[in-house]
Image: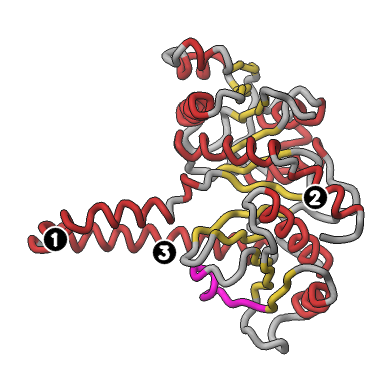
Amino acid sequence: MGRIVLLLALDAMGGDHAPSEICRGAILACKEHSDLEVALVGRAPLIEQEIGGAEPQVLRRIHVVHTDEYITMDELPAAAMRKKKKASLRLAMEMVRSGEADGCISAGNTGAIVAGGILVIGRIAGIDRPGLGVPIPALKRLTLLIDVGATVRCKPLNLYQFAQMGSLYMRHVMNVSKPTVALLSNGEEEIKGDEVIFEAREMLSKSSLNFIGYVEGKDIPFGTADVIVCDGFTGNAMLKFIEGTGEALYALFKDEMGQRLLPKVGILFFLPMLKELWTRFDYEQYGGTPLLGVKGAVIKAHGRSKAPAIASALRVARNFIRQNCLKSIEEELAQGGV
């Protein structure tokens, strides 16, 4: 039986807006979820300054774990995790490994999060490499794109295991009964793709997964599949392109609005619809990216996350734990499939 109250370790020093927005996100999450406690790991004087104004009933569920060390965005990930034994991210992960915390969240250095997941927490038995799966809001559904940066160079086995773990995540956390799985390639025809993609396709075709073949980059915004699998380099580039396109369209829209009077009047009628549309595609609503394949709940938040996105990442971690996603992945992989 799981804990009645969950304790999540939050790296207060990770991200572009740390520690202020990280701390505010913790406060928001504790207000939203009465079964949640958060351990903010980082420089205590800075953290205490940020959380001092929280309501007493919320403040009672926020704990501060002091350390002066933290890992910056430009440090070499594995080296930093090994060298900085008291880094806020490492301490948060050690809390998970020891059982003191139920999961950890960070908006910091992606490579360090992956390295820490492997070196500190450890991989699930049988998993060769972990994968970061990010939910992409699409027209038809929410699509999980995996991997988006954990494993840059993949073997066919890695892609196959990403598909397995992504499918299990969509079933147990997103409540998709039989997730469709596709490989990202340079064409939909079976002859497309390199040797790694081709061999992964063969493995997936023979599996019990609901594999539908290849998809192209243009298919992602339409939600052609529930799980789209690729190597970490391709996935990260695709993710950044999607984010950049959205921001560019928003900037173009604002620019056009500023130059013409008639659109300014017309926008009053379209404003409610535009707000709803923006909410559907706002990454802050979906919060965190699970690092699948490690023996703990590890959630990567967007590096630019502000308080609402941090609160969403904490919610993702909470749901991951409450729905026993890790145990389900371990058990079903041990049985040889999904």
Q: Quadrant of residue 247?
A: bottom left
Name the residue tied to disc 2: 329
Name the residue tied to disc 3: 245
Q: Is residue 87 visible?
A: yes
In the image, residue 187 sits, relative to residue 27, either above or below, namely below
Residue at image location 86% in from the left, 55% down from the top: 333
Say left or right for 335 vs 173.
right
Nearer-N-terminus badge (2/3): 3
Kind of residue at disc 1: Gly
| Secondary structure, magenta segment, majority class | helix
Say left or right for 62 vs 322.
left
The x and y percentages for residue 109 are: 62, 42
The magenta stretch is 214-222
Q: Can residue 151 be seen in this view?
A: no
The x and y percentages for residue 224 are: 57, 72
Residue at image location 76% in from the left, 22% down from the top: 100
Q: What element carries label 1?
A: helix
Q: What element carries label 2?
A: helix
Kind of residue at disc 2: Ile
